[in-house]
Amino acid sequence: MSTARQRVLLVDDEAPARERLRRLLLELGDIEVVGEAANGSDAVRLAGELKPDVCLLDVRMPGMDGLEAARHMALLPTPPAVVFTTAYDNYAIEAFDTQAIGYLLKPVRAEKLQATLQRAARLAGSQLAAIAHVDAARADREPAGRTHVAARLGEQLRLIPISDVYYFSADQKYTTVRHRHGTELIEDSLRALEEEFATRFVRVHRNALVNIGYLAAVERDTEGQHHVLLRELDERLTVSRRLAGELRERLLR
């Protein structure tokens, strides 16, 4: 009786590193490489589309690194088992803080790779889901300065660059992200976002955070209500009286 082949996604910004891993996996047998990615954003997208069993994920990549990509993958309905690969052992503690099931130093040795994949194969789907939920909760408590936020779209994730976000606004359970290409709902709380992006966003109201880079002006209407104007956006956001003065000072810096 044959067993199902283990489906693996390879992620590394260096093509030779991906090729070496592919050769090692081919030699191990009963493994199918379902896709490859050279950056974190593509890795998250492919993890959602291809639903691999395991993701061999390089830690140090330009743009979105492997640590952030793993945190986004944890939000998927069927997250892969993440195994980090890197030439730098100083990432070990942070890597395991994302609840990865393995950590392999480059150059990756065949016996270490095999042992790690065997461990991944023994984990049931419920165990992987539990790992992901622990990771998502920890990401809320301990923000890591992400380059993107993730919005759920069915079983997929849409990654939104922080640099494209005009503002975050809270509405009961969810937070709305208004960005350069539209509007999405995310599950991050406004308080967690404020702590994580304190150097890039400023609170204008108890229900809204604005990207400092898009601040244009603070105006007051005939009724005395303050509003903030944003570059590139034909919208006015209400500003609390208490915060209006602070915003004006920031614009003058």
Image (cartoon, grey):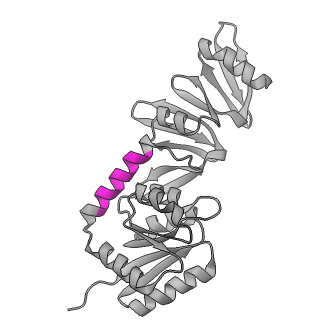
Q: Residue at x 64, y 36 (%)?
A: 199
Q: Nearer the viewer, residue 158 or 194?
A: 194
Q: Is residue 95 left or right of residue 61?
A: left
From this viewpoint, is residue 130 visible? yes
Quarter of the figure with the N terminus:
bottom left
In the displayed image of the protein, which residue is found farthest to the left? 1
**Horizontal and vertical percent for residue 53?**
37, 73
Q: Is residue 236 left or right of residue 249?
A: left
Quarter of the figure with the C terminus:
top right
**Horizontal and vertical percent for residue 249?**
74, 19
Q: Residue at x 38, y 67 (%)?
A: 80
In the image, which residues are magenta? 128-139
Q: Is residue 154 left or right of residue 160?
A: left
Q: Residue at x 66, y 7 (%)?
A: 224
From this viewpoint, is residue 180 visible? no
**Horizontal and vertical percent for residue 252?**
79, 23
Q: Residue at x 26, y 74 (%)?
A: 122
Above or below residue 195? Residue 130 is below
Q: Nearer the viewer, residue 60 or 7?
A: 60
In the displayed image of the protein, which residue is found farthest to the right? 252
- Prevailing secondary structure of the magenta residues: helix
Q: Nearer the viewer, residue 224 or 187?
A: 187
Please say whether residue 28 is one of the residues in the magenta stretch: no
In the displayed image of the protein, which residue is found farthest to the top? 223
- Location of residue 119 by image quarter: bottom left
